[in-house]
């Protein structure tokens, strides 16, 4: 029998994972906020062609148990979305979260007594219409137990050899911090300048990019993550080149005048920095965070 899983937050990333998990042999159901729908038809556009599938669609009123829940909401919405489903959890329910940023994993983990798989992904996907998802880049998805155990759950065998999945991480917190450092540079800068990722490498932005990397690296150094600090210039350059045509998620949210993940990304890092005895000076990052905290002009 096919293993079952649910995806809550079937937006751009959730839609992409619905196709990926179906291809990996799962029976996938979507959970969203439209009470009247029972099926959702989605089309995935990729450089190799297109595929259309219909997924069972459940509203929050459905009561059947959930065994494996992929959470693809924005990170600030994850805790509410999962809490609303907690009446459907059993003593074996596992949740997998793919949100950007940090600071919310412990609360999610408590809801399933520690059975939380934390993940980070560099997959690029947009949602040109409610029924369409467009793949911009396969990226890599890294998964590991938030509690840190070495052994992967059985269902990981279904996805481990796919081109988008990395090996099981025994220290996912380290992987999330590496991604956080990258997001702290790329996301605010592309959002505030309203440019695609690749334009960060233009000469005009070189100095700002270098300063941002320096400030983020200074915080990671003081936090004791010297390896993340040291590798940051190289990693940022790599992700920018790999995703040159993409819009960062923060830029896309800002263009839609939607809430961005600035608190979970930059807010989290600056909060950690403010707890340090010797705080590094990070004027650029602080100015970015206050710009991102400003309400949109017509709100
Ligand atoms: O994670 C991303 C995001 O946009 O949120 C990157 C890797 C920066 C790709 O755009």
Image (cartoon, grey):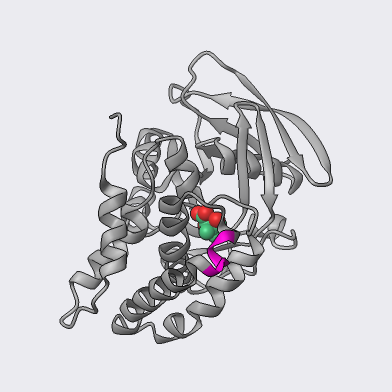
Residue 95 in percent (x, y) is at 48, 49
Residue 214 in percent (x, y) is at 38, 78
User: Which SS does the magenta portion mostly show?
Assistant: helix
Residue depicted at 26% across the width and 44% down the height:
294
Bounds of the magenta segment: 199-203
The quadrant where residue 83 appears: top left
Quadrant location of the C terminus in the rendered image = top left
Is 201 colored magenta in this rendering? yes
Residue depicted at 32% across the width and 50% down the height:
292
Quadrant location of the N terminus in the rendered image = top right
Q: Is residue 118 visible?
A: yes
Q: Is residue 252 left or right of residue 277?
A: right
Is 251 colored magenta in this rendering? no
Residue found at the far left of this picture? 277
Up/down of 221 relative to 142, above or below: below
Considering depth in this image, is 235 or 195 the residue closer to the camera? 195
Considering depth in this image, is 162 or 6 the residue closer to the camera? 162
Residue 14 in percent (x, y) is at 57, 41
Q: Is residue 94 visible?
A: no
Up/down of 202 relative to 55, above or below: below
């Amino acid at each position: 029998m096919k293993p079952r899983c649910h995806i809550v937050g079937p937006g751009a990333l959730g839609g992409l994972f619905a196709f990926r998990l179906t291809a990996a042999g799962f029976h996938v159901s979507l959970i969203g906020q439209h009470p009247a729908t029972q099926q959702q038809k989605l089309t995935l556009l990729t450089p190799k062609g297109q595929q259309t599938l219909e997924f069972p669609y459940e509203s929050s009123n459905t009561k059947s148990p959930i065994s494996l829940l992929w959470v693809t909401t924005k990170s600030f919405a994850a805790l509410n979305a999962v809490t609303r489903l907690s009446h459907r959890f059993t003593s074996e329910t596992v949740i997998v979260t793919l949100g950007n940023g940090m600071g919310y994993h412990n609360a999610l983990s408590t809801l399933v007594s520690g059975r939380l798989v934390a993940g980070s992904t560099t997959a690029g996907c947009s949602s040109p219409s409610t029924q369409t998802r467009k793949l911009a880049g396969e990226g890599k998805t890294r998964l590991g137990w938030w509690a840190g155990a070495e052994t992967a759950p059985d269902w990981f065998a279904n996805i481990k050899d796919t081109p988008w999945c990395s090996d099981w991480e025994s220290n996912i917190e380290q992987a999330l911090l590496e991604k956080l450092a990258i997001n702290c540079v790329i996301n605010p800068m592309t959002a505030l300048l309203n440019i695609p990722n690749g334009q960060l490498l233009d000469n005009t932005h070189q100095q700002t990019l270098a300063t941002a990397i320096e400030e983020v690296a200074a915080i990671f150094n003081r936090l004791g993550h010297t390896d993340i600090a040291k590798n940051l210039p190289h990693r940022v350059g790599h992700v920018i080149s790999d995703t040159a045509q993409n819009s960062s998620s923060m830029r896309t949210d800002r263009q839609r005048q939607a809430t961005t993940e600035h608190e979970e990304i930059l807010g989290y890092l600056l909060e950690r920095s403010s707890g340090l005895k010797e705080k590094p000076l990070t004027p650029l990052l602080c100015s970015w965070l206050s710009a991102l905290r400003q309400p949109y002009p017509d709100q």
